[in-house]
Image (cartoon, grey):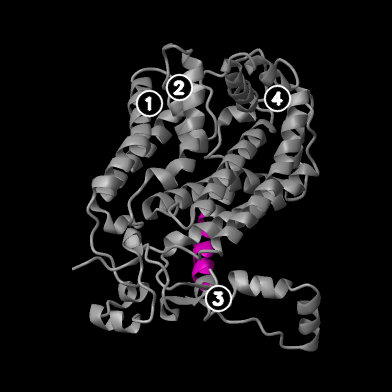
Amino acid sequence: MSFPWARQYTPATGFTKWVDEKLPLPRLVYNAVGAGYPVPRNLSYMWNFGVLAGFCLVLQIVTGVVLAMHYAANGEVAFATVEHIMRDVNWGWMMRYMHANGASFFFLVLYLHIFRGFFYASYKAPREMIWLLGVVIFLLAMATAFMGYVLPWGQMSFWGAKVITGLFGAIPLVGEPLQVWLLGGYAPDNAALNRFFSLHFLLPFVIAGVVILHIWALHIPGSSNPTGVEVKKESDTVPFHPYYTAKDGFGLGVFLIIYAVFVFFMPNVLGHPDNYIEANPLSTPAHIVPEWYFYPFYAILRAFTFDFILPAKLWGVLAMFASILLWFLLPWLDRSPVRSGHYRPLFRKFFWFGLIPTMAALFYLGGAPAEEPYVMFSQIFTAYYFLHFLVILPIISSIEKPEPLPYSITEAVLGSDKDEVRGEYSDVDPVPADRRGDALPAE
């Protein structure tokens, strides 16, 4: 969104004027994350997670490039090169632990970012494209993480690759050829390692490109905010710098403290001990599990245990992918004119007492053994997960009576008198009735 009151970049010296004429990179930064970018004045710390996700991506790219200098994608030596990095390379242990734990923290931040979007309906118009690109980023991150999990070539790496790629074999007609094409053979080996290493190195840069598009799309309508009310006046905003650079800096400091605790004091707590055993195709682990950030979708995959028209394995694969792909439909499934969950009492109940407990249960069940009663609970919570998005959310958005919204962001922050606020905003164009998320409800 082009804000007429946004500060304009003014080069201060002859050199900066010359740079601005030839390559206006300082102007781009100033307008994107500096004082030239007005942001709603009421953003909470829930809006820190986007910056934290970007930091995690940069951290993963930097540490990954360093690790790639010492890694060999060969089944005979891959496990040994990881141990070489840990024992012989200067600071190699720290690079490896930073990268491994960085992946977990990246997904933790992504999940928090996504669920903040669920609650505040960040997918609603005019921000649909921001949301769609965000889901693409999440899918690319999952693919990158899966391929990275294979590279240490431990027991869980090997068998995880075998199980996950084996899922493609459930697809009729093209499944087995697709599986062979992915692995470069009939089982994970050198060909699979080379392919996964190449893609694991490449995809983070693809993610970085989509992140740029994500930020670009964000700057067209501007940031959302906890009220869901759109910016109307200059008093509704503050410059991104220094207000939110300081706020994001504080959030980053807290994040780094927690991250450092894991890297230096419990670096393996988020991993699986079997991955410190070299891959052995003749010895199957008792309990094959992916990394923790795949648990909900792994629980959905295992929830299908009987054939019904299609094989159970194929139902599980379809449900696992559908559980994420349905996020693309959220801008059209949720038809409520109000964005923020703070003003949607019925939605709020189903979010906190339905969706959140369901996701927590799926996280737990994905790491539990594939036996009763865990399978039964996986089926129950999987059913509710799809019901929430495909049935409950559309019904709520149709029947719910929202609570009164503030007329403006300024009123939400300062608690101004409504008549006074209306007077201040008297020159603002009225908002159509079908966009009540931006207007004051009738009294």
Instruction: Say if 20 sits above or below 227 in the image.
Output: below
Q: Mark 4 touching mark 1, by CB under 8 A?
A: no
Q: Quadrant of residue 242?
A: bottom right
Q: Secondary structure at mark 4?
A: helix
- Residue located beneath label 2 in the image: 302
Residue 104 visible in image: no
Residue at 44% of width from left, 27% of height from top? 300
Query: Could you say which is closer to the camera, residue 140 or residue 282?
Result: 140
Q: Earlier in the sequence, mark 4 or mark 1?
A: 4
Q: Closer to us: mark 4 or mark 1?
A: 4
Query: Could you say which is closer to the camera, residue 241 or residue 319?
Result: 319
Q: Would you call the spot at circle 4 few (<14 residues within 10 Å), some (14-19), or many (20 or more)?
A: some
- Residue located beneath label 3 in the image: 241
Q: Mark 2 touching mark 1, by CB under 8 A?
A: yes
> Residues under labels 2 and 1: Cα distance?
8 Å
Question: In the image, residue 337 lies at what x, y percent?
Answer: 33, 55
Left-right relation of 246 to 175: left
Q: Would you call the spot at circle 1 few (<14 residues within 10 Å), some (14-19), or many (20 or more)?
A: many
Marking on residue 378: 1
Q: Mark 4 touching mark 2, by CB under 8 A?
A: no
Q: Earlier in the sequence, mark 4 or mark 3?
A: 4
Assign the magenta stretch its main secondary structure: helix
Q: Quadrant of residue 218?
A: bottom right
> Residues under labels 4 and 2: Cα distance?
22 Å
- The quadrant of the image that shows the C terminus is bottom left
In the current view of this chain or complex, which residue is farthest to the bottom? 13
Q: Earlier in the sequence, mark 2 or mark 1?
A: 2
- Residue located beneath label 4 in the image: 182
